[in-house]
Amino acid sequence: MKDDSQENPKSSSKKSLANNSIDIYAVQCVKCYKWRVVDTQEEYEEIRSKFTEEPYVCSRKPGISCKDTADIEYDASRTWVIDKPNIPKTPEGFKRSLVLRKDFSKLDAYYISPSGKKMRTRTEVAAFLEANPELKGVSIEDFSFHCPKVMEDTVPEYVEKKITGGGSANKKMKMSKDSD
């Protein structure tokens, strides 16, 4: 875990029964490896978009240093997902939504336009931007459908996981922490 943290900001997600979306954002300090909760998705996206050039350190959070206890601990009390650094910040007026699949296998990314249109692919975004030339300064490059990786060691035991290989592609089995 420590090796990844030196290069990647990380987001955490606790399973929300209502919509399986991320409800807590956190980043890991590159100096002490402690997790710091980020107040908003917008603030998290700002940190993530510049992570390589401006790695996160505890002192960026007002009144906090590496000597303070972590805001949150990495454990299986919630499902964690790990994001890649330098994903562009969502353009103003748009909303980026990440939704966890029922089987916890991955997240799906969507963008919601200022008019409420839900877009699932770069092709849909490109068509929307072409049809709305008044959105000056917004480029297809400002959108990323890359999704964070679900950390399997934090997926709840009751979740049925799809298994692949030999036989039917849609076989399911219950995963337990002891079966790894």
Image: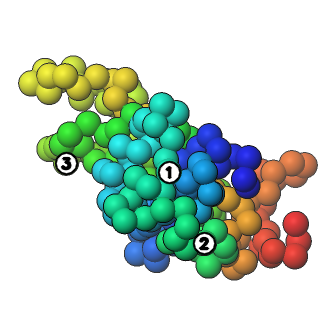
The disc at residue 73 is: 2
Given the image, on which type of amino acid does mark 2 rest? Glu
Select label 3 or label 1 by which is in front: 1
Q: Position of residue 75 (x, y in %)?
A: 66, 73
Q: Check whether the beta carbons of the residues at disc 1 and disc 2 lie within 8 A of each other.
A: no
Label 3, secondary structure: give it: loop
Q: Residue at x 50, y 51 (%)?
A: 57
Give the image location of residue 158, x and y in percent: 69, 79
Of the pair 61 and 101, the residue shown nearer to us? 61
Please identify the quadrant where the N terminus is shown: bottom right
Element type where label 1 sits in the image: loop
Q: Residues within 10 Å of mark 2 (few under 14, many from 20)?
A: few
Residue 36 bears which disc, if any?
none
> Does label 2 or label 3 sit earlier along the sequence?
2
Residue type at tag 1: Val
Neighbourhood count class around disc 3 (C-alpha, 10 Å): few under 14, some 14–19, many 20 upward:
few
Q: CA distance from mark 1 to mark 2?
A: 16 Å
Residue at the spot x=90%, y=49% of the render? Answer: 166
Q: Nearer the viewer, residue 61 or 81?
A: 61
Tally of numbered tags: 3
Kind of element beneath mark 2: loop
Q: Is residue 70 above or below residue 53?
A: below
Q: Which mark is residue 57?
A: 1
Foreground mark, 1 or 2, reads: 1
- Which quarter shows the C terminus? bottom right
